[in-house]
Amino acid sequence: MNYGGSNDASYIDKVLMFVNSSEAYNIEQQLHSCLCNKAAFEKYSSNDNFPLSKNGQTELYIEDILDLDPNYTDDQKYETLKKLKEKKILLSGKTAEQYNFEKKSLNILIKILAIIFFPIAIIMVLFFDFINGKNSKHEVADIFDRVFNGGRKEKARKEAKVKENVSKIMNKLSFV
């Protein structure tokens, strides 16, 4: 954390887990690979305007992804998300109103396109599944979920898979 004399370790207020292992690097890489979609800074990961720039910033997450902190609350996550959004708006050079208007406009456009192309997508799925002799029930249900439910079922499946993978990786630490 203090790479290059940065003194970034001063940001640490408590250590929730420390395991000395010859496999630490491999385990860390597996965790980062598994959790890449939960990274806090995404495309801003090497931006000097955010903490730990070029010194661990890609290893920051918004929530307690490993379930190690018994005092962690979702309110902390929402407060962090709020501050991160404010910082991204500031860096974009737009006002909050402009940023929110663009986001709402884009969401409306996406919904309009989804409504227009939804029947075409259903017909294509049914056609290709018929040709391949497959049952279309699950694929059509997934399309409905993505278009009309924001993909909640798909997100829940992915989240469950991530938790399962993290659990497997973390179990390796107990045998080290």
Image: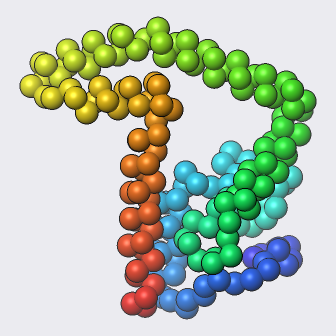
Q: Where is 76 relative to 83, above or below? A: below
Looking at the figure, which quarter contains the N terminus? bottom right
Please, which colouring scheme is shown? rainbow
Q: Is residue 169 visible?
A: yes
Looking at the figure, which quarter contains the C terminus? bottom left
Number of marks drawn: 0
The residue depicted at 20 percent of the width and 26 percent of the height is 136
Residue 155 point in image, percent of width and height: 46, 44
Image-quadrant location for residue 104 = top right
- Which of 170/176 is in front? 170
Image-quadrant location for residue 54 = bottom right
Query: Image check: 60 left or right of 26?
Result: right
The residue depicted at 82 percent of the width and 55 percent of the height is 50
Residue 160 point in image, percent of width and height: 41, 57
Q: Where is 120 relative to 133, above or below? A: above
Q: Where is 94 relative to 21, above or below? A: above
Residue 123 point in image, percent of width and height: 27, 12
Query: Image check: 64 left or right of 128?
Result: right
The residue depicted at 55 percent of the width and 51 percent of the height is 37
Q: Where is 112 relative to 156, above or below? A: above
Residue 36 point in image, percent of width and height: 54, 55
The residue depicted at 37 percent of the width and 26 percent of the height is 143
Q: Residue furthest left?
A: 133
Q: Is residue 47 visible?
A: no
Image-quadrant location for residue 9 = bottom right
